[in-house]
Amino acid sequence: MTNKTILFFAILITFLLPTMPVNEARGQLKAAGTIDINDSIDITTIPAFPKANEDVLVRIENFSYDLNSSEIIWALDGVIKEKSVGKKNFSFKTGKIGSVSLVKILVKTKEGKNMEKSLVIRPAGVDMFWQANSYTPPLYKGKALYSYQNQITVIAIPNIVNSAGAKINPSSLIYKWTKDSKVLGEVSGYGKNYFSFTKSMLSSSPEIEVEVMSSDKKIKASGNIVLDPTEPKVLMYENNPLYGIIYEKAVVDDFVMEGNEITLLAVPYFFGTGETNAQKIKYDWSMNGQNINNKQSDRQATFRNTNGSRGSARISVDLQNDVKELQSAGTSALLNFEGSESKKSFTF
């Protein structure tokens, strides 16, 4: 070999050496031959969609290498929190809405492979509300409860903040609704933060769940609610000619009639709003077990003590929705009337 040839090889080696991979000498984890963690390690969180100030469990799994014999380092926001062999779980607590938690996992297998993966968690939440199309009387301060065969609307109010710290408009988010574990594709989609349905059969309480995510799919949140249906009810109130309907005191149990006449009004609760307003509720009044009205649309009945007798009578009223067969209710009260005589002469 000539001197020129030797010189040529020497120059070639000099130019090639800097481009060849070398192991770092300062303990850096990314060395030659590092595995792409995205293809080899699965990472899950419990819960899947963490909320604000909530405990979160992070788990990793690998089906190519034995993590039980690997050294695993867990870092949170740049600070090492755990470091041990086989440490596949890590727990921490999220911050407030809009905060960011960076979880970094570093793995050194016994075969000498180094792997890493990062997980960014932005806590978010979804508040769930519902509104039933159920009838309640005027001045009623409670919530109109949900009963079978009435329409109910479920509303999702997400609390999701973007990376800039601004709350995302609910109409700009994507919603996926499920009912009893069945995805409702027809009511899911962009900006669809509510939907309505009617449960017509007597069965278990429906469970509604919604999954909400940003348009870039980087932030997700979920919420769920179980809807416990109630049975409709009816209460009787005195319709006083001077004071009007006395909603403050229902006629229940034993009730003393003041004077010789009383008018009782049957008021439905949680029946269908449409049927109640359209007078499609049947009212069956009875006294001591005997039907006393022929017109089933009468919401009230008047009772008179015509000759000052003393005694009592069991007053009952039963309601039936003429359109929705599952909606019915009944109530009764013992009406006591006092007079100078013990005769039980009582009319309606």
Image (cartoon, rainbow, N blue to C red):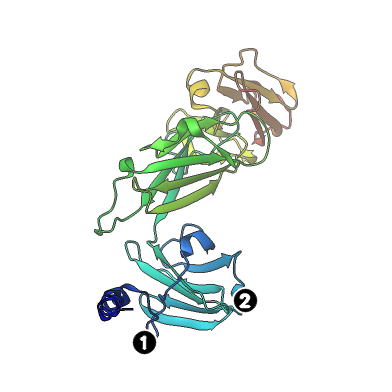
Q: Is residue 200 left or right of residue 287?
A: left
Residue drawn 38% across the image and 47% down it: 157
Residue drawn 51% across the image and 49% down it: 224
226 or 106: nearer the eye?
A: 106
Q: Is residue 133 visible?
A: no
Residue situated furthest bottom in the rendering: 26
79 or 134: nearer the eye?
A: 79
Q: Position of residue 230 (x, y in %)?
A: 61, 39
Separation of residues labelled 1 and 2 (CA atoms): 26 Å
The image's mark for residue 26 is 1
Residue drawn 32% across the image and 40% down it: 171
Q: Where is mark 2, residue-wise?
A: 68
Q: Quadrant of the N terminus?
A: bottom left
Please report whichever mark, 1 or 2, sits nearer to the chain's N-terminal start.
Answer: 1
Assign a secondary structure to mark 1: loop
Q: Is residue 300 left or right of residue 169?
A: right
Assign a secondary structure to mark 2: helix
Please name the amino acid that badge 1 sits on: Arg
Neighbours of disc 1 within 10 Å: few (<14), some (14-19), many (20+): few
Q: Is residue 20 left or right of residue 228?
A: left
68 or 48: nearer the eye?
A: 68
Please name the amino acid that badge 2 sits on: Asn
Neighbours of disc 2 within 10 Å: few (<14), some (14-19), many (20+): some
Residue drawn 59% across the image and 28% down it: 149
Q: Is residue 300 visible?
A: yes
The image's mark for residue 53 is none
Q: Mark 1 and 2 residues: CB-CB less than 8 Å, in contact? A: no
Quarter residue 32 falls in? bottom left
**Relative height, residue 79 to residue 212 (above, below):** below
Q: Position of residue 41 (x, y in %)?
A: 53, 64
